[in-house]
C-alpha cells in the first residue's frame, strides 16, 4: 500500500500531525499493612469524649491501687485478736491524752506569761522548772512519783542483754519518765552489753535479780509489759521469773554526772 491510499496515517484531519501515543503512568507504590496501621494511630485523633473517658479510667485505676495498698497495710491488724486490738486502741488513746495534757500545760504557761504582772519572775520560775524536768531526763537529778518495780530473776542465766533492753524500750513507749536498773540510771544513750548471765549496763556489770525502778503511770506501764508475745512472755520462755508491783511512791535516785557537750552550743541569744 502506498502513502496516497492512507493519508490519515501521517496527519490528522485538517492538516495537523497526529500526536504520538502517551506512555502509561507508573504504578502507585504499594503501602504495607504496618504503614497503614501507623498512619491510623499517629498522630492521635482523640475526641473530647474519648479524652474525658481516658481521664476517668486513670482516676479509677489510681483509686483501686490505693485501696489495694491500704487493704494490705491493714492485714496485720485484721489478723489480731480482739483483746490485742483493744489494747492497741487503749495505748493510742493514752498517748493522745498525754499529748493533749502537754499541750494544755504549754497553753497554761503561755497564759501565765501573758497575764503575769511580773513576767520576768514568772519566766525565771518556768526556766527553773524546765531545768528540773530536763535534769530528770538527763539523769542528773533524783525523781519521785508513782510507777512500778519490775524484778526479773534468772536462775538459769539465760536472760540476754537484748531482752533487758526490750523491757526498757517497752517501758519508754508506755510513758516511763525515769528508770534505773540495779542502781544504774537509764538515760537516752544507755546501752546493754555482754552475754546471757553476764550483763553490763553502760559498761557496769549487773547481776540477777535485775530490778527496774520506773516512774510513770502504773496503769500504762504494767499492761505494756504483759502484752501477748511481749517482755514478760519472752522472759518466761527462758525460765525467768517476772514480778511487777505498782506503787504510788517510787524513788529513782541513781544519778549521772552532768556532761558538757564537745561541739553543740546553745543557739539562744
Image (spheres, helix red, strand yellow):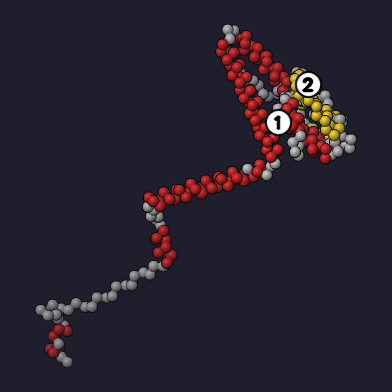
- The crowding category of the residue bearing disc 1, from other C-alpha atoms within 10 Å (few below 14, some 14 to 19, many at least 20), is some
Q: Quadrant of the C terminus?
A: top right
Q: Residue at x 61, y 21 (%)?
A: 104
Q: Position of residue 141 (x, y in %)?
A: 75, 18
Q: Quadrant of the N terminus?
A: bottom left
Task: Please state if 79 lies on the left or on the right of 5 as rendered.
Answer: right
Secondary structure of the residue carrying numbered label 2: strand
Question: Circle 2 sits on which residue?
Answer: 250
Q: Residue at x 76, y 30 (%)?
A: 222
127 on left or right of 235: left
Q: Is residue 162 shown above or below 56?
A: above
Rendered image: mark on residue 216: none
In the figure, is residue 33 to the left or right of 268?
left
Count up the numbered dots: 2
In the image, 238 versus 263, the foreground residue is 238
Residue located farthest toward the top when viewing the structure as drawn: 117
Quarter of the view holding residue 241: top right
**Secondary element type, mark 1:** helix
Tell me if 87 is positioned left or right of 58 in this view.
right
Residue for point 72% across, 29% down: 220
Residue 54 percent across, percent down from the top left:
44, 50
Residue 188 appears in the picture as rendered: no
The residue at the far bottom in this view is: 1
Which residue position holds label 1? Answer: 173
Q: CA distance from mark 2 to mark 1?
A: 19 Å
Q: Position of residue 242 (x, y in %)?
A: 83, 33
Q: Position of residue 131 (x, y in %)?
A: 69, 17
Residue at 69%, 42% in the rendered image? 80
Specify whether residue 66 is in view. yes
Amino acid at each position: 500500500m502506498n502513502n496516497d491510499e492512507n493519508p490519515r496515517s501521517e496527519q490528522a484531519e485538517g492538516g495537523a500531525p497526529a500526536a504520538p501515543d502517551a506512555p502509561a503512568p507508573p504504578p502507585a507504590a504499594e503501602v504495607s499493612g504496618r504503614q497503614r496501621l501507623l498512619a491510623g494511630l499517629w498522630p492521635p485523633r482523640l475526641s473530647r469524649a474519648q479524652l474525658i473517658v481516658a481521664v476517668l479510667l486513670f482516676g479509677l485505676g489510681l483509686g483501686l491501687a490505693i485501696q489495694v495498698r491500704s487493704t494490705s497495710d491493714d492485714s496485720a491488724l485484721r489478723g489480731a485478736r480482739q483483746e490485742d486490738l483493744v489494747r492497741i486502741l487503749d495505748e493510742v488513746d493514752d498517748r493522745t491524752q498525754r499529748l493533749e495534757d502537754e499541750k494544755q500545760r504549754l497553753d497554761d504557761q503561755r497564759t501565765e506569761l501573758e497575764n503575769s504582772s511580773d513576767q520576768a519572775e514568772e519566766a525565771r520560775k518556768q526556766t527553773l522548772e524546765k531545768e528540773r524536768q530536763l535534769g530528770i531526763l538527763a539523769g542528773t537529778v533524783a525523781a519521785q512519783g508513782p510507777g512500778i518495780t519490775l524484778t526479773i530473776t534468772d536462775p538459769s542465766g539465760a536472760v540476754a542483754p537484748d531482752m533487758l533492753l526490750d523491757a526498757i524500750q517497752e517501758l519508754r513507749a508506755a510513758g516511763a519518765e525515769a528508770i534505773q536498773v540495779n542502781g544504774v540510771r537509764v538515760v537516752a544513750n544507755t546501752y546493754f552489753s555482754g552475754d546471757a548471765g553476764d550483763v553490763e549496763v553502760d559498761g557496769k556489770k549487773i547481776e540477777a535479780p535485775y530490778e527496774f525502778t520506773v516512774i510513770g503511770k502504773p496503769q500504762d506501764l504494767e499492761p505494756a509489759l504483759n502484752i501477748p508475745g511481749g517482755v514478760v512472755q519472752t522472759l518466761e520462755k527462758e525460765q525467768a521469773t517476772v514480778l511487777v508491783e505498782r506503787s504510788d511512791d517510787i524513788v529513782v535516785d541513781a544519778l549521772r554526772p552532768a556532761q558538757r557537750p564537745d561541739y553543740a552550743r546553745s543557739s539562744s541569744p
